[in-house]
Amino acid sequence: MAASLAAPPAAAGTIKISTWNLEWLTARPAGDAALPPDLVPRGTADLRLLASYAARLDADVIGLQEVDGPAMAARLFPADRYRIVMTGDAVVQRTGLAVRLGLAVTRHPDLAALDVAPPGAPHRLRSGLDVTIGDGTAELRILVVHLKAGCRDAPPADPRPACRTLRRQMAVLDDWIAQRQDEGVPFVLMGDFNRDLTPRDPYFRAWQGDGPLTLATALHASPCWGGAYFIDHVLLGNRGRDWLVADSLRVLTYDQQDPAWAARLSDHCPVSVRLRMP
């Protein structure tokens, strides 16, 4: 599987979209109250290395997760090439988007309904970033999400707190998908779902009730850090399904093979597909 996900040559007339969880990408110092007590933030050399992978990724649109604001995102995606858009959440692990200059960006309200935590909860959940991008001839609605961890493959009825939380978040996404299907706009839903989504997953099947979807990661396993099922996904709806370039799913793996490097790079690898917008 890893061989089939090697980096392809650039394709004329297409745009490359990617999703990348950057695992606590923050400039806050170790010991900051908002960080896990054992977290060691990246140093300058680590950020430089991550920036080199971002350059190698060379995507036009990158959905970001676990980034502590636009300034940190710009360390990897510089302002002379990308515009950074991020949610307004007051959390460290924000979702965002890096968009190559030249593409138009229209901002929609953050999907704050994904924060299903009760009032007074010590930790808030992450909103989704909702934007429309355009290349002058076509537009694409994009929602970037980072969902609750801890219910990777359990059935929706699982009573564990993490699964109850994920179930409520999936219902919010179902509403968002239904609205886009009703509007008929091409759309992409991507990010870290913390879920082994497959065509048989009950949540995915429920979303299909609103209209057909294409799950770009279906029937594949990720080669990231030795291989596992995907939890980072790209879904396409309406005409966006027709724009997907066949066999364009790719995972950019790191040259560093020792798992100890995951803390300095990320425990996720960038996942990408190509779209041929009309």
Image (cartoon, helix red, strand yellow):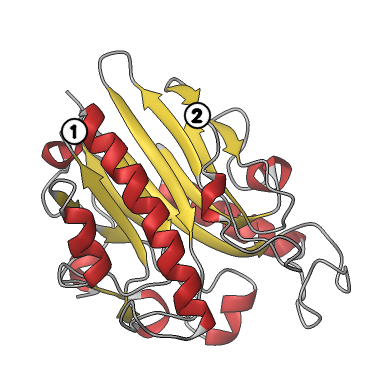
Q: CA distance from mark 1 to mark 2?
A: 24 Å
x 28%, y 57%: residue? 7
Picture quarter with the C terminus: top left
First of labels 1, 2 by sequence position: 2
Where is mark 1, residue-wise? 276
- Residue 90 appears anywhere in the view: yes
Report which quarter residue 58 is drawn in.
Answer: top left
Task: Pinpoint residue 172: horizontal percent, then vertical percent.
Answer: 41, 52
Where is mark 2, residue-wise? 108
x 74%, y 50%: residue? 90
* Side of 93 relative to 254 (left or right): right
Q: Residues within 10 Å of mark 1 (few under 14, many from 20)?
A: some
Report which quarter residue 230 is drawn in.
Answer: bottom left
* Side of 256 relative to 175 (left or right): right
Report which quarter residue 269 is drawn in.
Answer: bottom left
Q: Which of the pair 243/185 is nearer the observer?
A: 185
Q: Residues within 10 Å of mark 2 (few under 14, many from 20)?
A: few
- Secondary element under disc 1, as helix, strand or loop, is loop
Compared to 96, does 135 lie above or below?
above
Task: Pinpoint residue 252: horizontal percent, then vertical percent.
Answer: 38, 62
Task: Pinpoint residue 125: horizontal percent, then vertical percent.
Answer: 61, 60
Task: Pinpoint residue 203: horizontal percent, then vertical percent.
Answer: 27, 66
Q: Amino acid at mark 1?
A: Arg
- Secondary element under disc 2, as helix, strand or loop, is loop
